[in-house]
Amino acid sequence: MRDQLSTSRRAFLKGGGALVVTFSVAGHVSPVSAQAAKTVALDDVDGFLAIDATGAVTVYSGKVDLGTGVRTALAQIAADELDVSLARVSVVEGDTALTPDQGPTYGSLSIQIGGMQLRRAAATARRALLSQAAERLKASPDDLVIEDGTIKAPDGRAVTYVELVGGRNFSLKLDKDAPTKNPAQYKIVGTSVARADIPDKVMGRFTFMQDFRVPGMMHGRVIRPPSIGATLVSVDESSVRDMAKVTVVREGNFLGVVAPNEWTAIKAMRRLKAVWSSREDLPDQNKLWEHVRATPVAKDDVTSNVGDAATALEQGRRLKATYDFAIHTHGSIGPSCAVAEMKDGKLTCWSPSQAPHNLRKQLAAMLDLPVENIRVIYVEGSGCYGRNGHEDATADAALLARATGQAVRVQWMREDEHGWDPKGPPTLVDLEGALDAKGDVLAWSSQFFVPNGAATNVKLVAAELAGLPHETADAPGNIQQNSAVPYSFANTHTVAHRLAGTPFRPSWIRTPGRLQNTYANEAFLDELAATAEADPLEFRLRHLKDPRGVELLQRLAALAQWQARPSPKHQSGNIAFGRGISYVKYELVRTYVGAVAEVEVDRENGTIRVARFFVVQDCGQIINPDGVKSQIEGSVTQTVSRTLKEELIFDRSRVTSLDWASYPILTFAEVPDIVIELIDRPTEPPWGAGEPSAAVVPSAISNAVFDATGVRLRSVPYTAAKMRAALRGT
């Protein structure tokens, strides 16, 4: 490592007075100059780490903490790899002027990919620091030890990180051969470190994006078309002329108002008279699945093909079923919010976007600005769960800021959030299976009807309404994952029909595709087990060849004290009790999860209650056990809600489920007890922890309902009305 005296990129930003590296999100941060906003290279140690003149370590992460605890886990990784105390480490995340572009924060890849990039950067830095210390101390690097940023020789002489590099660049490329520490030497990784953000969140002191303010900013609201695809015919600006300092902004079909305070903006939004065309382009919701099945197929993805499933199906005891999973909205508790400021042709946005670097490019395209003239700074939002409306609120604010020349804050209304955020698309699955004479699976065949598309940006509503450049991608990618099954069947054929369109602008919601696909597969596997008169756990183990999967299911059986329930079903009065099991190997390549749901079904009114939920998870090396458990608890709770309650309601023109009454979610009283066992494998790579546990929830509930009642529910959500109809046999 060169002993470089030049100031680092971040020191330049600090010294120029344009920015402080860490800042209170309650305060104002001025836009960075174009000259300072250099691209941060993914292969530079300086892109990930800085050690200042006091010995404090700053981690720069393109992955952001969406309330998932990633911020804490990244600090743990850096602290352990550099041999410094956790108190020395702070994290800057999602600032496009300071952090590397590590891709969007999705797919449970923040630690698996982003964290390992950071670990490699820290290992490279650590080796270089040891090498330079060895030269200075005239000792072998192997004889040196590091204690909280001080490198010591056997004779007691020492040199600190500050003396070696404090306040200067590392000027190093990431070295894939730089050895990371032996897991046995970790002191912080693998321990449950308390998250620093939780006390303020619990006590209401935390500054979410919705609380963020810029001095002198204005407030904006967008007037939405009464139907999706409608065009703006005329606007009567005189309808708000008597409202002081209200500005009407129109660009194409984009219509907004800007006012000095939020309440005035809301009143102006409601009072402004506008005439729109009418559109009825959405399908009849009562015929949604006919619409999905009739949608043209853009391409077919054959996700598994073993043996000859078509022939084998004809030779065994055959079973067929169709499962469907409703359209879901994100339903973020805090409506999407952002602040944008345009000065001297440069745009700064404060946004909860889970993809700030991607959003920066989208805004550049929309506004026809050089990407280096745009800076997006991440501020944590109140709820995300996938690509919700955060990016769209940011685009709204950017258009209003450009039109008015002032900083503008946009917070969506509840009807904006439910009506205009992108949706989790509908999923329809046809399955067939056949059993041989011994009751083993002879053949398995399935067809999934899912949108076409790639894992790219979701197009911005503001850009589309304004007639400005926007993306043409029409669906989240990789939602065919887990359509293939993790079991060893002699004859298997699974295909994902990638549909040319879907009723609403689609995006990823927690565990996209993997959730719906695992639901259908694991519920249908239970149907085959019941037909074979086999215990569902034993049936899975019989067809599972993966040793880690087998161990996980065995540990799940012990945790949940699993045993086959005898007939007749267990019942007390009108309440029937049941247990159901489910298993996934996420994307067939990483995290293993097994679950047992315990449900109570009221046979009279049809309500289903998930009383207890057992989870065993193997995600390789665990960075923060408490953080992983929190992720599992959140995944289970949200997915129980999605399974039992949530369904988008719409007419031929628009979404009509615009509030919590028409789009209900799980209440605190309905949250199940969640019992978790983690399998920590310190010598294995860490895998995703957040999404995988959601994948097993719907099928575990489905299988438990069957165990309780003998009735199969194949259509999510499992509402009381559907349960009553199923019990009546209608």
Image (spheres, rainbow, N blue to C red):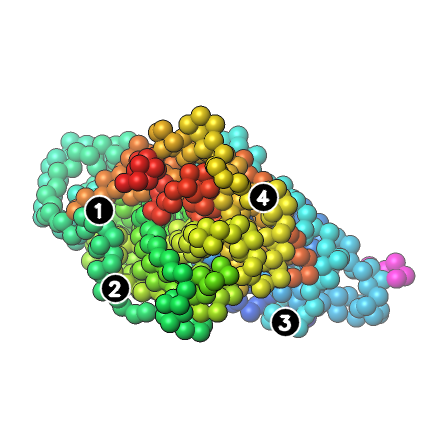
Task: Write down the residue under mark 3.
Answer: 175
Point out the residue furthest to the front here. 437
- Residue 354, numbered circle: none
The reply to whether dot 2 and dot 1 touch (C-beta < 8 Å) is no
Front label number (3 vs 4): 4
Answer with mark 1 or mark 4, whichever residue precedes in sequence: 1
Amino acid carrying label 1: it is Gln
Q: Distance between the residues labelled 3 and 4?
A: 51 Å
Q: Distance between the residues labelled 1 and 4?
A: 41 Å
**Magenta-highlighted residues:** 154-158
Task: Write down the residue under mark 1.
Answer: 285
The reply to whether dot 4 and dot 2 touch (C-beta < 8 Å) is no
Front label number (1 vs 3): 1
Q: Magenta stretch containing residue 680, yes or no? A: no
The reply to whether residue 321 is in sight is: yes
Front residue of 451/220: it is 451
Answer with mark 2 or mark 1, whichever residue precedes in sequence: 1
Front label number (2 vs 1): 1
At x 58%, y 64%, the residue is 545
- Residue 563, numbered circle: 4
Answer with mark 2 or mark 3, whichever residue precedes in sequence: 3
Q: Residue 658 is drawn in which quadrant?
A: top left
Q: Residue 150 is drawn in which quadrant?
A: bottom right
Front residue of 325/259: it is 325
Task: Write down the residue under mark 2.
Answer: 500
Amino acid carrying label 3: it is Asp
At x 56%, y 59%, the residue is 542
